[in-house]
Amino acid sequence: MPRAWHLKSRPNGMPTSDNFELKEVTLADLADGQVRVRNRWLSVDPYMRGRMNDVKSYVPPFQVGEPLEGGAVGEVVESRADGFAPGDLVMHMAGWREEAVVPTAGLNKLPSIPGIGEQAFLGNLGLTGGTAYWGLLDAAQAKAGDIVFVSAAAGAVGSAVVQIAKAKGMTVIGSARGPEKCDFVKSLGADAVIDYKAGPLVKSLAEAAPKGIDVYFDNVGGDHLDAAFAHARKDARFAICGMIDGYNSGEPMAFRYIMRVIAMRIMLKGFIFTDYMPRMGEFIADMGQMVASGQVKERDTIVDGLENTPDAFLGLFTGKNTGKMLVRL
């Protein structure tokens, strides 16, 4: 029988392995319009931490005792749906498991792009790349000539933002943790990189961006967001994608420089990837060209085996990943 990871209990602060349970599941027989998918790649992402809390948000919380969900790429092994046949590769949201029965409304058939691996549709050609693309170019209205500050620039979304911004003619300052990750961000083309553990962020950003910043792409919140307030230029635009600093702390954030929102006329815009689903054709056309040309590259951190999915997820909060964290089945 196929296996799936279930939420055993709700975490208090940082999750632990005790919050997860791997159990066998019985799959329902296929109804019309459904397919059975055997997963090949699973995505783990920081936003999943919020779904482990029993609070109202933009997506429903995970239910205790039920299988977890997340992005996945798999192969259709049985179909009762028009347009889908065994052997088709698809992307869907029934991750954290080996197999799933999925309605066609929850499936996207993967196009074949020479030189592009199927896992890229969980990364730069999927939710990760789409989040970076729309957050930078639409939510933050970034344009050629802007000075862009990106937090967590060695992560999946941040590394895509760095490369998209460079491809579109922007100056980019990234933040990352430690020399190895800073070197990675530099290799992506960033004009400057801050090791946020090496000194006070406000001072480090002042040195990296002496003229200030026009755009801040926020993956972290906390001190990073405050430093961005401190160095924002007039009419700066902030795209608020994530605040990983606060996901496990339980403590409210405090900002010393938030009053500069008024003087600098700063625009803050939160956004969600699904806001842009009707425009995915635009994204695939533009991002696909950047990926195919080598302007945007992907680096994955791959963990093998369904058994290790919780460890891969927890590694997101302790800096275990460079680029996209994936589980290979």
Image: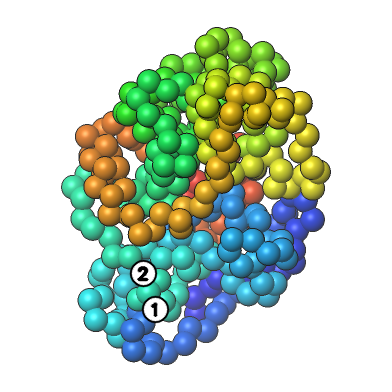
- Which residue is pictured at 26% across the width and 33% down the height? 294
Amino acid type, callout 1 = Pro
- Viewer-nearest residue: 97 or 138: 138
* Circle 2 residue: 107
- Which residue is pictured at 68% across the width and 75% down the height? 65
For disc 2, the neighbor class at 10 Å (few under 14, some 14 to 19, many from 20) is some
Q: Position of residue 302 (x, y in %)?
A: 46, 46
| Disc ID at residue 32 | none
Left/right placement of residue 185 relative to residue 203 reads left
Q: Quadrant of residue 224?
A: top right
272 relative to 32, above or below = above
For disc 1, the neighbor class at 10 Å (few under 14, some 14 to 19, many from 20) is some
Marks 2,1: beta carbons within 8 A: yes
* Circle 1 residue: 103
Q: Secondary structure at mark 1?
A: strand
- Viewer-nearest residue: 159 or 88: 159
C-alpha gap between disc 2 and disc 1: 7 Å
Q: Quadrant of residue 141?
A: top left
